[in-house]
C-alpha cells in the first residue's frame, strides 16, 4: 500500500491519470494507493471525492483511496468540509504540497480527525524558514550557489503539530520525514503517548544532497535530500520501528517541466515502479534490513496509519497480494514505465529484486514472470 501518491487527475492529466498511475502502481507491486488532494480542482469537497472514486472504479488497476484537503483550495485559510469528504469515501485529509501554516487551522483539523476517525497527513515545513530554498541548506548548497532550506524548517513544524496532537487527541501522520532530529521529536512524543505515525520515502532512505552536484532536477525534492547523517538516521528509524511506513510521494511531472534550470524546476520524483527494487537492493540485500520488516513498512504499516484494510494474509481479508522475486536483476529504465512521467531519481540504477505479480481482489492485474 502506497499511502502517498499524486495521481494528478482531475486537472493535470498531461502529468498522470488515475489509469496510468494505477497501472504504474500494480507494475511496482502496489495493490492500493492513497491519492493526494492537490488536484485541479482541489479535492476539498464531496463532489471531487466522488469523482475520483467513480473514475477509479472505471479505470483503476488497483484500489484508490482519496485523501481530502485540510483547507479549501489548499489556501490554508478556511477548513474544508472534512465530514462530507469522509462520508463520500476520503480516508484522510492533507494539504500535501503545502504546509498548514495557520496553527489554529491545524488544531481544528486535528480535532475533526478525532471526531471522524481519519488521520491528518502533514507536510511539515515552515514556509518562512524554507523561504525560496530549493535544496538542503548546507555545504553542497553553498558550493552550488543555490538557496537552501534549513532542516529546522521541517522540525519546528513537526514540534508544533505534535503539541497540537497532544492537546486535541487528534491523529497526526507526519509525511516524508527527512531528518534525524525530526525522528527524535517523534520518539519523544510517543513516550508522552501522543498519537502520531510517520513515513519515509525511498529517495530519502537511499540518496543524499551530494547527488545534486550535477544540478539534476530529478533530485529536486520537498523536503530536500539531506546529508548522509540524516539518511543513516532514517534507516535506523526503520529498524527501531519509529517509522511506520515507506511511501513514495510519487510526484509525476512532464519532461518539459523538469528540463529547465534547477531553481525553476518543480519539486518531486516518481516512485511507484522503482520503490520495491530500489529498497530490496539497498536496504535488504546491501543494508541488512530484514525482509519481513520491509514488507511490513509497505503493507501493514500504511494500512494501520490510514485505518484501511490490507496488509494481511488470512481468511476473510481482501485478496490483495504481491509476489516478489528477490533475485531478479535489472536496470531502472524510465522508458519502460507505465507512468506517463519519467522524472525518476533512480534512472540507470542496477537493482536486484522486483515485484513480479500483483493481485487485487483475487484478480491478477500484473504478471511479469
Image: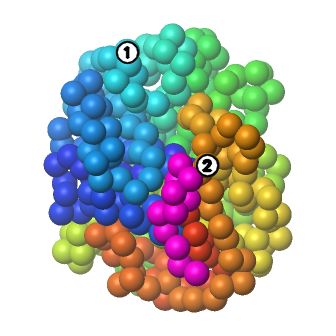
Q: Indicate the position of residue 270 as horizontal and vertical percent values.
A: 41, 65
Q: Nearer the viewer, residue 170 or 136?
A: 170
Q: Is residue 56 visible?
A: yes
Q: Residue shown at 46%/74% (left/top)?
A: 345
User: Taking 292 as reference, is 344 above or below it?
Assistant: below
Viewer-nearest residue: 2 or 251? 2
Magenta stretch mostly in which secondary structure? Answer: strand
Query: Residue 210 placed where, x, y %?
Result: 54, 76
- Residue 183 in sight: no
Q: Residue 290 in the image: x percent, y percent?
A: 82, 63
Residue at 57%, 34% (x, y): give it. 308
Q: Secondary structure at mark 1?
A: helix
Residue placed most toward the observer, 193 or 153: 193
The stretch drawn in magenta includes residue 354: no
- Check whether the beta carbons of the residues at disc 2 and disc 1 lie within 8 A of each other: no
Looking at the image, residue 9 lies above or below residue 77: below
First reached walking from the N terminus: tag 2 or tag 1 = 1
As measured in the structure, the alpha-carbon distance from the residue carrying label 2 to the one carrying label 1 is: 30 Å
Q: Which residues are magenta?
A: 359-369
Q: Quadrant of the C terminus?
A: bottom right
- Reply above or below: 106 against 95: above
Between marks 2 and 1 in the image, the one whose residue lies nearer the viewer: 2
Give the residue number, with chain letter if any, for mark 2. Answer: 319
* Front one among 49 and 194: 49
Place residue 123 in its image quadrant.
top left
State the colouring used for the structure image.
rainbow
Indicate the position of residue 88 as horizontal and vertical percent values.
34, 24
Residue depicted at x 72% and y 28%: 189
Q: Which residue carries the number 1 mark?
A: 83
Amino acid at each position: 500500500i502506497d499511502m502517498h501518491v499524486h495521481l494528478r487527475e482531475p486537472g493535470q492529466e498531461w502529468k498522470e491519470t488515475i489509469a496510468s498511475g494505477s497501472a504504474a502502481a500494480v507494475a511496482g507491486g502496489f495493490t492500493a494507493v492513497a491519492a493526494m488532494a492537490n488536484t485541479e480542482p482541489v479535492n476539498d469537497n464531496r463532489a471531487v471525492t466522488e469523482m475520483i472514486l467513480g473514475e477509479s472504479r472505471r479505470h483503476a488497476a488497483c484500489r484508490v483511496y482519496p485523501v481530502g484537503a485540510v483547507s479549501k483550495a489548499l489556501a490554508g485559510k478556511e477548513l474544508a468540509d472534512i465530514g462530507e469528504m469522509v462520508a463520500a469515501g476520503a480516508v484522510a485529509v492533507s494539504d500535501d504540497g503545502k504546509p498548514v501554516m495557520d496553527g489554529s487551522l491545524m488544531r481544528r483539523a486535528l480535532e475533526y480527525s478525532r471526531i471522524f476517525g481519519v488521520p491528518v497527513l502533514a507536510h511539515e515545513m515552515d514556509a518562512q524558514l524554507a523561504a525560496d530554498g530549493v535544496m538542503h541548506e548546507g555545504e553542497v548548497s553553498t558550493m552550488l550557489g543555490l538557496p537552501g532550506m534549513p532542516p529546522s524548517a521541517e522540525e519546528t513544524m513537526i514540534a508544533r503539530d505534535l503539541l497540537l496532537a497532544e492537546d486535541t487527541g487528534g491523529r497526526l501522520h507526519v509525511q516524508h520525514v527527512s531528518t534525524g532530529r525530526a525522528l527524535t521529536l517523534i520518539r519523544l512524543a510517543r513516550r508522552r503517548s501522543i498519537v502520531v505515525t510517520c513515513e519515509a520515502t525511498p529517495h530519502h532512505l537511499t540518496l543524499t544532497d551530494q547527488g545534486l552536484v550535477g544540478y539534476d532536477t530529478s533530485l529536486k525534492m520537498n523536503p530536500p535530500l539531506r546529508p548522509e547523517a540524516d539518511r543513516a538516521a532514517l534507516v535506523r528509524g526503520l529498524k527501531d520501528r519509529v517509522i511506520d511506513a515507506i511511501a513514495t510521494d510519487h510526484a509525476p511531472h512532464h519532461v518539459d517541466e523538469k528540463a529547465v534550470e534547477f531553481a525553476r524546476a518543480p519539486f518531486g520524483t516518481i516512485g511507484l515502479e522503482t520503490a520495491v527494487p530500489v529498497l530490496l537492493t539497498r536496504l535488504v540485500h546491501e543494508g541488512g534490513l530484514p525482509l519481513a520488516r520491509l514488507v511490513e513498512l509497505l503493507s501493514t504499516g500504511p494500512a494501520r496509519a490510514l485505518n484501511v484494510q490490507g496488509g494481511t494474509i488470512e481468511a476473510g481479508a481482501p485478496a490483495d497480494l504481491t509476489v516478489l522475486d528477490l533475485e531478479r536483476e535489472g536496470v531502472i529504465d524510465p522508458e519502460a514505465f507505465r507512468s506517463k512521467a519519467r522524472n525518476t531519481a533512480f534512472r540507470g540504477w542496477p537493482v536486484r529484486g522486483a515485484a513480479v505479480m500483483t493481485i487485487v481482489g483475487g484478480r491478477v492485474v500484473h504478471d511479469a514472470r
